[in-house]
C-alpha cells in the first residue's frame, strides 16, 4: 500500500544563509487569468508539513495566513514532462500553466471534500499510473469536508504536480480536521489516507469580516517597495498604485508569489503610497477603496523582518488624469548596463561582482539587475544590493544608499554563490 506524501516545504527561491534574501522576480502579468472552473474539480491529494521560510509560494509567512488549513495548487500542467520551466510561465507557454495560474489563485479559499481511498500504490512516481495494483474504494471518511486557503504552489517533478491537473497538496495538520456529520474525522491520517482522491471548488472567504491586511516584505525599501496583501474576501488578481503623476498604474507581481506586489510612491522617490486592489473576479475590492500608508522607519534601509505589518487609512480618490492603469515607464534619459565577473572561486562555490553603469544622460534614481543561472546555482549572501531568486532567475535592486548614479558613473554589488561557476544568461539592467 502506498504511503502518504511528505513533501518538504522547500519553496521557490527561499534562502537564509549569511544574509536573508527576498523571494521572487518582479515581472508584469501580461495576460488575463485563466477562467476558474465552475464545477467541482477532482484529483489526487497529497500533504506537506509547512510553508517555506520565510514565505510560502503566495508570498506570506505561515503565521500571517487567514487559516491554519492551507493548500498548494499545481504550478504546471505538463503530463509526462517533468522538466524545469521558468516561473512565472510566460504567455508563449500558456498550455503549461496549471491551476496555480502563475499565482493568481493565491489567497482564495477552496472547499475540499474527501473521496475514495486507494488500495494500491499511489506514490506519484513519474510516468506511473495513480493507484496502480489496486482500486479506488469508498469508505467511512468519504464526504468529509474542510475549507482551506490557497497559500502555496506545487512544482515538483512528480506525477501529482505534473500529470494530475486537479491535484491538491494539503497541510498535514489539517487532514484529521476534516469534518463529517459535524464531527472532525480525527484519525484519517496516517492509517486511512494513502493519497486519496478529493473534489474541490472555490468558495468565498468564510465568515469574512474586517478589511485587508498589508505588510512590507523582507528587504523592502524606498527603491523596492514590495508589499503583501492578505485577509482577502475573494483572492487578489492585481494591485494598482497611485503614481507621482496622479494616474493609477499596475503594480508588478513579485514573480508568481500571487499576494506580493512591487508598488510605487505617490511622489517621486517618496515613501507614501496609495493602492487599490482587484479580486479574483478582477473587480475592485470594496468598490475601489483606496488604502494609504507609508514606509515604516525601520524599513528605510530595508525591512529586516519577513513581514512588517502596517496600518493605513482608507478613502476614495478620483485622479484628474485617465484612470486606466498604465504600465510604469523608464524616465526619459535614464538607462543602464551591467557586467559581471567571477572574482574568486573554491570547491563548491564562487564570488561574483556586478558593475552597474549609468549609460544615459540623466542620473539614475534607482536600478535593478537581472540574470539567469545556467544550472542549480544558489545565492547565499550579497552586499550593496537586495537580491531575489526564483528558480534560476535572479533580480537585484539597489540599496537605499547606492540607487542614485550620475550619468557615466558606476556602482557595484556582489554575491557569494554555491555551485559551479557557469556563464550567466539574460544579464540586463533596468533604470529607474
Image (cartoon, rainbow, N blue to C red):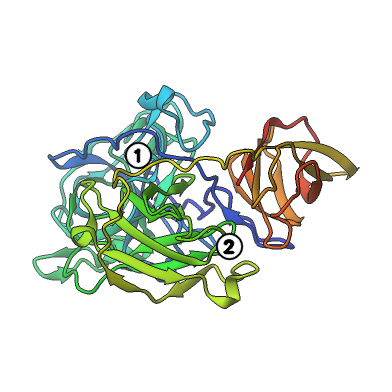
Helix, strand or loop at mark 1: helix
Confirm whether residue 192 shows in the render: no
Q: Is residue 239 left or right of residue 396?
A: left
What residue sits 59% from the left and 69% below the top?
A: 303
How far apart in space, not on screen, are marks 1 and 2 (Cα)? Answer: 30 Å
SS at mark 2 in the image = loop
Query: Badge 2: few (under 14), some or many (20 or more) residues near its Cα, within 10 Å?
Result: many
Quadrant of residue 38 within the rendered picture: top left
**103 or 327, nearer to the observer:** 327
Question: Residue 101 shows which numbered tag?
Answer: 1
Nearer to me, 86 or 272: 272
Q: Is residue 28 above or below residue 146?
A: above
Location of the N terminus (image quadrant): top left
What residue lies at 16% left-to-right and 52% top-to-bottom?
142
Figure check: 411 above or below 342: below
* Residue 380 or residue 124, whichever sits in front: 380
- x%, y% of residue 170? 34, 54
View extreme (left): residue: 181
Task: Work out whether 89 lies above or below 196.
Answer: above
- The mark lying in front, picked from 1 and 2, is 2
Q: Residue at x 57, y 64 (%)?
A: 218
Which residue is under mark 2? 222
Q: Is residue 33 left or right of residue 253?
A: left
Q: Is residue 356 visible?
A: yes
Q: Position of residue 166 (x, y in %)?
A: 28, 38
Amino acid at each position: 500500500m502506498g504511503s502518504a506524501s511528505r513533501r518538504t516545504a522547500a519553496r521557490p527561491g527561499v534562502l537564509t544563509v549569511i544574509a536573508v534574501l527576498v523571494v521572487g522576480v518582479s515581472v508584469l502579468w501580461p495576460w488575463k487569468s485563466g477562467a476558474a472552473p465552475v464545477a467541482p474539480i477532482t484529483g489526487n491529494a497529497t500533504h506537506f508539513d509547512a510553508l517555506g521560510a520565510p514565505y510560502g509560494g503566495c508570498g506570506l509567512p505561515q503565521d500571517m495566513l487567514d487559516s491554519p488549513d492551507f493548500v498548494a495548487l499545481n504550478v504546471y500542467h505538463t503530463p509526462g514532462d517533468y522538466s524545469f520551466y521558468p516561473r512565472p510561465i510566460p504567455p508563449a507557454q500558456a498550455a503549461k500553466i496549471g491551476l496555480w495560474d502563475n499565482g493568481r489563485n493565491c489567497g482564495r479559499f477552496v472547499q475540499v471534500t474527501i473521496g475514495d481511498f486507494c488500495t494500491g500504490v499511489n506514490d506519484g512516481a513519474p510516468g506511473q499510473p495513480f493507484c496502480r495494483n489496486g482500486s479506488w474504494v469508498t469508505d467511512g471518511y468519504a464526504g468529509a469536508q474542510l475549507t482551506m486557503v490557497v497559500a502555496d504552489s506545487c512544482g515538483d517533478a512528480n506525477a501529482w504536480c505534473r500529470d494530475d491537473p486537479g491535484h491538491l497538496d494539503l497541510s498535514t495538520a489539517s487532514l484529521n480536521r476534516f469534518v463529517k456529520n459535524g464531527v472532525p474525522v480525527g484519525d484519517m491520517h496516517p492509517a486511512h489516507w494513502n493519497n486519496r482522491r478529493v473534489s474541490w471548488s472555490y468558495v468565498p472567504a468564510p465568515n469574512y469580516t474586517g478589511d485587508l491586511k498589508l505588510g512590507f516584505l523582507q528587504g523592502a525599501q524606498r527603491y523596492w517597495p514590495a508589499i503583501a496583501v492578505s485577509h482577502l474576501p475573494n483572492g487578489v488578481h492585481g494591485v494598482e498604485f497611485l503614481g507621482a503623476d496622479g494616474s493609477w498604474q499596475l503594480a508588478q507581481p513579485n514573480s508568481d508569489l500571487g499576494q506580493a506586489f512591487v508598488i510605487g510612491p505617490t511622489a517621486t522617490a517618496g515613501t507614501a503610497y496609495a493602492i487599490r486592489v482587484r479580486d479574483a473576479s478582477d473587480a475592485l475590492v470594496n468598490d475601489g477603496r483606496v488604502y494609504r500608508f507609508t514606509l515604516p522607519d525601520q524599513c528605510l534601509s530595508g525591512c529586516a523582518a519577513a513581514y512588517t505589518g502596517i496600518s493605513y487609512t482608507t478613502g476614495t480618490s478620483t485622479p484628474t488624469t485617465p484612470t486606466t492603469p498604465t504600465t510604469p515607464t523608464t524616465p526619459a534619459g535614464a538607462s543602464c548596463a551591467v557586467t559581471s565577473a567571477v572574482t574568486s572561486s573554491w570547491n563548491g562555490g564562487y564570488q561574483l561582482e556586478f558593475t552597474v553603469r549609468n549609460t544615459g544622460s540623466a542620473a539614475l534614481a534607482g536600478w535593478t539587475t537581472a540574470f539567469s543561472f545556467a544550472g542549480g546555482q544558489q545565492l547565499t549572501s550579497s552586499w550593496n544590493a537586495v537580491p531575489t531568486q526564483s528558480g534560476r532567475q535572479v533580480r537585484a535592486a539597489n540599496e537605499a544608499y547606492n540607487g542614485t548614479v550620475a550619468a557615466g558613473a558606476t556602482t557595484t554589488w556582489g554575491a557569494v554563490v554555491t555551485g559551479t561557476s557557469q556563464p550567466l544568461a539574460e544579464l540586463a539592467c533596468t533604470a529607474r
